[in-house]
Image (cartoon, rainbow, N blue to C red):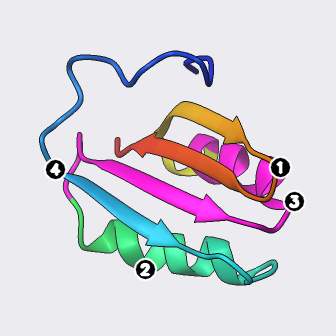
Amino acid sequence: MVDSRDELPEAAPDREVELDTTGLYCPEPIMLMHNKVRDMRPGEVLKVIATDPATQRDVPKFCQFLGHELIRQEALEDSYRYFIRLG
């Protein structure tokens, strides 16, 4: 995992897909992530924006279980951001 102060690795693909789950609570953010990755290809990056603190636990587990790489995780003042490279 890349520290939140670092930029995305230079090998990041041109296409980055954003999923905004602001205001949604468990299990909705993870359900929407499952739906979104179905439309994506391996190597593409999914940027997830969330406000549910449970995503700090759920997103890394989602990645580990499905073989995706959590390349960056940020905890901001009022939201969380995750950058996931699809495996």
Q: Label 4, label 2: how many angstroms apart (C-alpha)?
A: 17 Å
Question: Along the polypeptide, which appears first: circle 3 or circle 4?
Answer: 4
- For mark 3, what is the residue? 53
Amino acid of disc 3: Pro
Residue depicted at 66% across the width and 76% down the height: 22
Q: How many marks?
A: 4
Q: Position of residue 41 (x, y in %)?
A: 19, 55
Element carrying mark 1: helix
Which residue was labeled with disc 1? 57
**SS at mark 3 in the image:** loop
Quadrant in the rendering for residue 60: top right
Which corner quadrant holds the N terminus? Answer: top right
Q: CA distance from mark 1 to mark 3?
A: 8 Å
For the point 24% across and 29% down, which residue is it?
A: 12
**Can you tell which of label 1 and label 3 is closer to the viewer?**
3
Label 2: element kind? helix
> Residue type at mark 2?
Asn
Q: Which residues are magenta?
A: 41-64
Q: Give the number of the mark in front: 4 or 1.
A: 4
The residue lying furthest to the right in this view is 53
Q: Residue 9 location, x and y as percent?
A: 33, 18
| Mark before the other along the chain sequence, 4 or 1 | 4
- Mark 3 Cα within 10 Å, few/some/many (few <14, many 20+)? some
Q: Is residue 64 left or right of residue 10?
A: right
Residue placed at 76% from the left, 67% from the top? Answer: 51
Left or right placement of residue 87 versus residue 62 in this view: left
Mark 4 element type: loop
| Identity of the residue furthest to the front in this view | 77
Q: Is residue 36 above or below residue 62?
A: below
Q: Earlier in the sequence, mark 4 or mark 2?
A: 4
3D distance between C-alphas at marks 4 and 1: 26 Å
